[in-house]
Image (cartoon, rainbow, N blue to C red):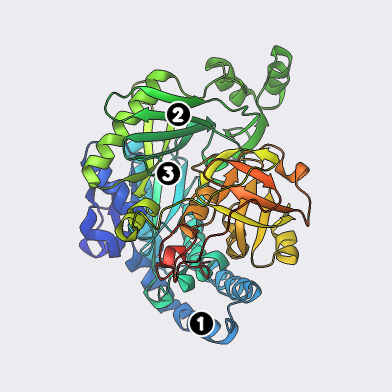
């Protein structure tokens, strides 16, 4: 195989070559992965298609000028529909435009070299966005760009690199950058191409308590299968709180995990399955998805069984402490346990980014600013997981789709839905609080709510059934409770303070964010 020349290396860097001096070249996600590799933390092997490759693509093809034209002519008042139109125009331009030959060759050679490293022909990889303006200490940019899983073969990898580049221009990413006053001209995209982990269990962990800010705790949330369902809030996860000093599990909550996402090698795609509760259901699954059924049988996967053993929880906590020590910062970490590899080598970290909410809050808060609103005694309508602290009263709007939210939501309403994903964020900025049926405190909805500074209760199980349009309710995100009526005791407003006491000049908490 031809060895990559020095000129090629401005387009391709291997993760083991990456460190925190390469942020502008490889983006926040890749820097996190490269730094973890250097610290001896297990990370799936891979390479980065650098931001220089992206710049070369948009300049050589004329897309750069097209982007400038669309942004100036289409986004006038910042309405969600303007962002949607601009996004559609820009992204379709990326997909239609062929990639220049030298860029194609550099990506193809890197993929073939990765195949040699792994020892598998046409290995399955994750093609992951790594924007140069994401995973920053002051803003996570969580979920703003796209990731593509189970991509295989040179041509597919190249096409999905283009799609990842295009996702720099999603409506949610455009709106998010505008809300934080981040220049679109300074936003570039690198792409991580990384060996897929065949996840038995996956999840997210924080090296502090993401709701209370308790620095003495590690919070781990986990589900069966691939991690998309925990980040997207499609499954309410198991939750474990670990003491940093003793590594003792001080709290645990096992949730019914009735569905999961697994890779089906016969269909060559991820499929959602119902987790079998009986032997009969397992036998039926064997007829449809035999490979997945074998994983479920091997690991005795059941809805009510913890998705992690106590030993795995402690091992994750140990790794989390190592990551926090390396970065000298509280961290938000995504992890996966591979079903195809025997322990103890089956644990991988797939992302680590700075925790953005409490680290920013502590820079500006005072004891007076962090006082909770007082709740008068009221009728409890639903209970769930406290996901974002604070209290807010408003009118319920139940929305089961983004389209429904677009029609119903007005500023100050309480958004009630089954779950949220990044497509909801243009409308989340209108909400005084968020309540969901599914999800945990590390789901995308919870993270976004905390960054917005608005209360959130997730994983209620039945909020969309109990709460009705037009109801006046109070959401207590600190306790995970929704009350009937307005039960907040009024307090004098503090000038220029957001819902959690942080000045609204902090971009992450501005009501105009997203």
Q: Residue at x 26, y 56 (%)?
A: 4
Vertical relation: 50 (above or below) 247 = below
Residue 233 appearing in the image:
no
Task: State the mark number for residue 240.
Answer: 2
Left or right of 369, for residue 426 = right
Q: Residue at x 62, y 65 (%)?
A: 430
For label 1, the residue is 66
Q: Residues within 10 Å of mark 1 (few under 14, many from 20)?
A: some
Q: For marks 2 and 3, give the CA distance.
A: 12 Å
Vertical relation: 430 (above or below) 20 = below
Q: Residue at x 42, y 43 (%)?
A: 212
Task: State the mark number for residue 210.
Answer: 3
Q: Are marks 1 and 2 in contact (CB under 8 Å)?
A: no
Q: For marks 1 and 2, give the CA distance.
A: 48 Å
Q: Secondary structure at mark 3?
A: loop
Q: Which marked residue is nearer to the observer: mark 1 or mark 3?
A: 3
State the residue in front, 95 or 458. Answer: 458
Residue 424 appearing in the image:
yes
């Amino acid at each position: 195989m031809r060895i990559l020349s020095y000129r090629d290396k401005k387009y391709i860097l291997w993760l083991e070559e990456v460190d925190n001096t390469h942020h502008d070249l490889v983006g926040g996600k890749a820097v996190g992965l490269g730094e973890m590799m250097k610290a001896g933390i297990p990370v799936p092997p891979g390479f980065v298609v650098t931001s220089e490759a992206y710049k070369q693509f948009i300049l050589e093809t004329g897309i750069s000028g097209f982007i400038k034209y669309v942004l100036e002519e289409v986004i006038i008042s910042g309405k969600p529909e303007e962002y949607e139109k601009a996004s559609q125009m820009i992204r379709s331009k990326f997909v239609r435009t062929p990639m220049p030959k030298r860029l194609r060759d550099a990506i193809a050679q890197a993929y073939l070299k990765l195949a040699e490293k792994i020892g598998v022909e046409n290995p399955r990889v994750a093609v992951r966005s790594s924007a140069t303006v994401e995973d920053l200490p002051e803003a996570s940019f969580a979920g703003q760009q796209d990731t593509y899983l189970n991509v295989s073969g040179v041509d597919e990898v190249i096409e999905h690199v283009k799609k990842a580049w295009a996702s720099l221009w999603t409506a949610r990413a455009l709106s998010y950058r505008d809300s934080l006053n981040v220049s679109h001209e300074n936003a570039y995209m690198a792409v991580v191409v990384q060996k897929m982990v065949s996840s038995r269990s996956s999840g997210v962990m924080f090296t502090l308590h993401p709701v209370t800010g308790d620095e003495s705790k590690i919070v781990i949330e986990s589900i069966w299968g691939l991690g998309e369902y925990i980040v997207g809030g499609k499954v309410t996860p198991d939750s474990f709180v670990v003491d940093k000093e003793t590594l003792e599990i001080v709290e645990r909550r096992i949730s019914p995990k009735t569905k999961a996402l697994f890779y089906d090698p016969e269909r060559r795609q991820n499929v959602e399955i119902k987790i079998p509760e009986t032997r009969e259901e397992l036998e039926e699954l064997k007829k449809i998805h035999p490979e997945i059924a074998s994983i479920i049988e091997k690991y005795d996967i059941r809805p009510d069984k913890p998705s992690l053993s106590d030993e795995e929880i402690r091992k994750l906590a140990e790794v989390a402490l190592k990551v926090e020590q390396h970065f000298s910062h509280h961290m938000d970490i995504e992890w996966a346990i591979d079903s195809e590899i025997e322990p103890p080598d089956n644990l991988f970290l797939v992302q680590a980014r700075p925790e953005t909410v409490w680290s920013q809050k502590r820079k500006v808060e005072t004891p007076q600013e962090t006082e909770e609103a007082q709740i008068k005694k009221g009728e409890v309508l639903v209970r769930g997981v406290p996901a974002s602290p604070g209290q807010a009263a408003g009118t319920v709007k139940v929305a089961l789709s983004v389209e429904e939210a677009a029609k119903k939501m007005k500023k100050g309403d309480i958004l009630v839905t089954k779950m949220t994903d990044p497509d909801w964020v243009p409308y989340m900025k209108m909400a005084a609080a968020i309540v969901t049926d599914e999800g945990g405190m590390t789901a995308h909805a919870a993270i976004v709510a905390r960054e917005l500074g608005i209360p959130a209760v997730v994983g209620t199980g039945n909020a969309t059934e109990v709460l009705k349009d037009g109801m006046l309710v109070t959401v207590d995100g600190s306790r995970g409770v929704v009350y009937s009526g307005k039960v907040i005791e009024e307090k004098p407003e503090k000038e220029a303070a957001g819902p959690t006491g942080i000045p609204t000049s902090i971009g992450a908490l501005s009501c105009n964010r997203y």
